[in-house]
């Protein structure tokens, strides 16, 4: 049981300026199911892609069966009996299951493909591991679960002893997931070693022998399932920084609701209803923090509120005016500011100047134009005042925004979105990828607009940010509000429970 | 600023290299390079006929280049300017020949306005397909060019045929004629219209909120939608302007130069216009100079073909090499990046 077959030590991997892994450790023993868990972007997939040879690490060592490698490529990985099932299936839709499985490894009979032998071989595997797939159907006619089994069969037929599954349950229904777990259990019993990447705690607790947690591109801990609890994992996964800088606020916000969401359903690009019956109220002069593990519908919610995504059921009111499915322009006319999650394509036009970016939302109003001719004197003056108020560096209105640093680019966005006449501010990940100095400044601006009576919906993956700015905290889980707690009652523990699908009653 | 200067350098450099290659070919054809270029230059500028011809060539090249550049502002490549030009031309020809009883100013205006409307309407087809259904505009516009060409062919052989043996419409009435100057050349006052249109476009794009919205929609339609601009509508409008200018170019050709629509009168004028726009990197401010330069080359090429053994198409070849070299700008970048990356890798190894 104790024989280690794979060891990854001190792996570092960067993509340009982005650090995907700053400290990666991983150890896999023969015959275990070892889960790798962490939030989106924690570096799980990247680490495993390094093991499968798809990425070359900047530094660190890969030890397989006692032999040390600087890096691998998929070919050597396969020869070392490592197989990986990716999030996106690598199958040819127009070919049958049988053809897909043997593709590239066809048994030949003279010049012809020996389909008979191939079929016999594959059937053997199907029976051995209970991997039921219809061999004669085309991939495009299969369900996602079946296609995934085809992928697993493919890697097994290549002789894999180590199987990496990258978020396999993300695309499956709960029933299909259970079937997958049965298959994984069978595989484990036959001596295969399995790496199971996921961010869903319950699944991980269900099937793993051991669990490795990554957070913010770093290794956190490896735990033995028997000796741990969901709560312990949740805390390690989400982080346990001491929550500093919580503002002592004595704002008395009244009960006037400025943003009201009534039972909305919103589709995502993949799922039909990513947001499923969500209701929420933001009052005048309060910051409502929306916490949650990334990918539980935060993006879709914000887009739906700001006119960027269609709501197919339910209603939204801004300052008591219905704003369901109106254009972004119309939402803005209701005095809503929106700091978008995606700074580089939505928040900024990177090809144009700071000045042009700052005036973008104001141009139609006739403030800066006289008979549709832009008054460049006024816009420059306005831009300079914004640059000064929000401390954008360098303070050059004509500078193209693509040359700004992350923090200053974000300050340009924030300066455009926060105005004196605002009623509602929707801030989505306002400080993600921003340097510490700018983080403080941006939070200060959000705080200031709250003081002026703006209702703020703050969406952030950063719990510390949520806790330091919010008055109330709503937790989103799988497209619904799992619970709302006042910041006084919020602890890292009860938030973690809500964020991972638990309920407060149980605790 | 530095970047812009580099860009000018590249254009000049490309031009020089193109002429060196041209010289080699001319020498290989057994002609004296200096004599040929001398004739080329005098053929473009020496005397009212020659200079007039240069100006005559300039107008449609200039306008179609603007038309293409405008479409690129909304991130669409309107290869269909030629179609707008052809349909605008025949619309102007028909209006010029069949509408009677108007004073010149009204007759010319009416014919040109109809040409503009027809040209814009033609560009609406690829625009709507691109924006609503995401159909590739290049395929659509290339195919629509043939539709436009053969449709005008049908018109000049059928309903609007002048019955003179050549596939053309009736000659337009005198009241629809745009006056000429630098006689006996065919230079006409359409050039003033073209220059006015150019400055209007330049003004719209640099000074107005409308231009700001169009430019932003083309550069980043998501951002534009986000800040409250109806970016889809703006992009369609951009295409309509592009088509309109194409139609105007056709109208001026008929009313100012030919006096009727002759099947095949435009030897891919709009394609040359597109190339001019590409050389200028779709920068409106650079288009006039380059359009004039290309017009001069084409006009000079006529004399060159007459007085030397160098065929006229040599000039087209020269222009092509020129464009190729300018387009290589990207390649210079790639090579530069490769060198930098190689250095980095070597440093990493050490």
Image (cartoon, coloured by chain):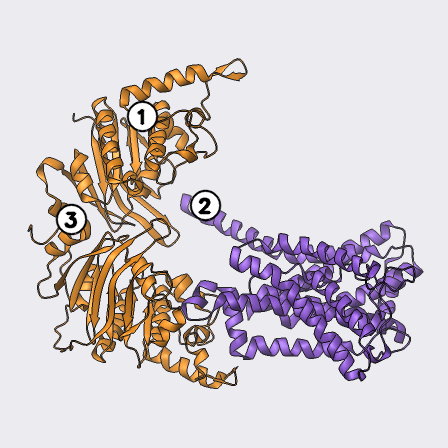
Chain colours: A orange, B purple
Q: Is residue B77 left or right of residue B173?
A: left
**Image x and y of residue B311, in percent:** 87, 55
Confirm whether residue B281 shows in the render.
Answer: no
Q: Check the residue under mark 1 and report the chain it is in.
A: A
Confirm whether residue A161 shows in the render.
Answer: yes
Which quadrant of the figure has residue A446?
A: bottom left
Q: Check the residue under mark 2 and report the chain it is in.
A: B
Which residue position holds label 3?
A: A234
Q: Nearer the viewer, mark 3 or mark 2?
A: 3
Residue at the (27%, 72%) spot, across then down: A441
Please say if B197 is above or below A233.
Answer: below
Q: Is residue B248 left or right of residue A271?
A: right
How far apart are the two marked residues, 3 and 2, measured between alpha carbons? Answer: 43 Å
Which residue position holds label 2?
A: B346
In the picture, the disc for residue A132 is 1
Residue at the (24%, 36%) spot, across then down: A175
**Image x and y of residue A145, in percent:** 32, 35
Asked whether disc 3 touches disc 2, contact meaning CB atoms under 8 Å apart, the reply is: no
Which quadrant of the figure contains the N terminus of chain A?
top left
Residue at the (75%, 68%) spot, across then down: B91
**Kind of element beneath mark 2:** helix
Please say if A76 is above or below B29.
Answer: above
């Amino acid at each position: 049981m104790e024989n280690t077959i794979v060891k990854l030590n001190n792996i570092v991997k960067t993509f340009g300026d982005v650090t995907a892994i700053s400290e990666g450790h991983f150890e896999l023993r023969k015959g275990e199911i070892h889960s790798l868990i962490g939030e989106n972007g924690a570096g799980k997939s990247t680490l495993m892609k390094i093991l499968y040879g798809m990425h070359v690490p900047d530094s660190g060592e890969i030890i397989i069966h006692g032999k040390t490698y600087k890096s691998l490529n998929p070919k050597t990985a396969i020869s070392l009996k490592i197989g990986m099932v990716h999030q996106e299936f690598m199958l040819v839709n127009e070919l049958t299951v049988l053809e897909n499985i043997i593709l590239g490894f066809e048994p030949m009979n003279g010049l012809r493909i020996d389909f008979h032998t191939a079929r016999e071989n594959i059937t053997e595997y199907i029976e051995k591991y209970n991997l039921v797939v219809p061999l004669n159907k085309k991939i495009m006619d299969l369900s996602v679960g079946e296609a995934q089994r085809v992928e697993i069969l493919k890697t097994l037929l290549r002789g894999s002893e180590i199987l990496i599954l990258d978020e396999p349950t993300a695309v499956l229904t709960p029933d299909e997931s259970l079937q997958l777990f049965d298959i994984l259990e069978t595989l484990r019993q036959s001596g295969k070693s399995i790496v199971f990447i996921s961010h869903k705690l319950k699944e991980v607790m269900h099937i793993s022998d051991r669990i490795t947690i990554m957070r913010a591109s770093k290794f956190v801990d490896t735990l033995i399932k028997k000796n741990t609890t969901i709560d312990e994992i949740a805390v390690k996964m989400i982080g346990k920084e001491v929550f500093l800088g919580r503002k002592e606020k004595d704002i008395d916000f009244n009960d006037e609701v400025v943003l009201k969401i009534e039972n909305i359903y919103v589709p995502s690009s993949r799922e039909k209803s990513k947001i499923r019956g969500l209701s929420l109220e933001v009052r005048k002069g309060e910051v409502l923090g929306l916490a949650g593990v990334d990918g539980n519908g935060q993006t879709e919610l914000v887009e739906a509120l700001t006119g960027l995504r269609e709501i197919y059921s339910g209603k939204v009111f801004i300052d008591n005016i219905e704003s369901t499915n109106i254009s972004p322009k119309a939402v803005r006319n209701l005095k809503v500011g929106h700091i978008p999650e995606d700074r580089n394509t939505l928040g900024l036009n990177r090809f144009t100047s700071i000045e042009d970016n700052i005036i973008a939302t104001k141009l139609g109003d006739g403030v800066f134009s006289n008979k549709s001719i832009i008054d460049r004197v006024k816009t420059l003056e306005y831009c300079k005042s914004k640059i000064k108020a929000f401390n954008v560096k360098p303070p050059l209105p004509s500078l193209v925004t693509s040359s700004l640093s992350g923090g200053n680019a974000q300050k340009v966005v924030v300066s455009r979105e926060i105005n004196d006449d605002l009623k509602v501010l929707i801030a989505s990940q306002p400080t993600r990828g921003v340097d510490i100095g700018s983080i403080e400044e941006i939070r200060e601006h959000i705080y200031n607009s709250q003081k002026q009576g703006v209702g703020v919906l703050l969406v952030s993956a950063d719990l510390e940010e949520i806790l330091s700015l919010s008055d109330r905290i709503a937790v989103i889980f799988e497209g619904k509000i799992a619970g709302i707690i006042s910041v006084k009652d919020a602890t890292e523990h009860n938030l973690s429970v809500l964020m991972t699908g638990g309920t407060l009653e149980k605790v | 600023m530095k970047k812009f200067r580099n860009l000018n350098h590249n254009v000049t450099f490309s031009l020089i290299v193109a002429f060196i290659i041209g010289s080699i070919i001319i020498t290989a054809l057994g002609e004296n390079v200096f004599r040929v270029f001398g004739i080329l230059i005098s053929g473009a500028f020496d005397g009212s006929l020659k200079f007039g011809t240069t100006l005559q060539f300039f107008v449609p090249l200039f306008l179609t280049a603007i038309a293409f550049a405008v479409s690129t502002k909304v991130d669409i490549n309107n290869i269909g300017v030629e179609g707008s030009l052809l349909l605008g031309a025949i619309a102007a020809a028909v209006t010029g020949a069949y509408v009677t009883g108007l004073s010149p100013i009204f007759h010319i205006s009416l014919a040109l306005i109809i040409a503009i409307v027809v040209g814009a309407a033609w560009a609406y087809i690829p625009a709507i397909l691109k924006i609503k259904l995401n159909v590739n505009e290049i395929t659509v516009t290339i195919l629509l060019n043939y539709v436009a060409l053969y449709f005008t062919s049908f018109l000049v052989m059928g309903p609007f045929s002048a019955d003179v043996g050549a596939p053309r419409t009736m000659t337009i009435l005198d009241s629809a004629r745009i006056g000429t100057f630098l006689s006996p050349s065919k230079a006409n006052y359409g050039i003033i219209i073209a220059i006015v249109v150019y400055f209007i476009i330049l003004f719209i794009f640099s000074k107005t909120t409308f231009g700001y919205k169009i430019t932003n929609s083309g550069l980043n339609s998501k951002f534009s939608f986000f800040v409250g601009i109806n970016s889809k509508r703006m992009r369609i409008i951009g295409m309509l302007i592009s088509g309109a200018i194409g139609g105007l170019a056709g109208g001026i050709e008929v009313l100012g130069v030919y006096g009727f629509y002759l099947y095949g009168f435009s030897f891919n004028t709009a394609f040359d216009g597109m190339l001019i726009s590409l050389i200028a990197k779709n920068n409106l401010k650079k288009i006039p100079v380059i359009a004039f330069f290309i017009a001069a080359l084409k006009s000079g090429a006529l004399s060159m073909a007459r007085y030397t053994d160098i065929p006229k198409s040599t000039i087209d070849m020269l222009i092509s090499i020129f464009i190729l070299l300018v387009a290589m700008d990207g390649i210079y970048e790639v090579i530069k990046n490769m060198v930098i990356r190689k250095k980095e890798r070597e440093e990493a190894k050490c």
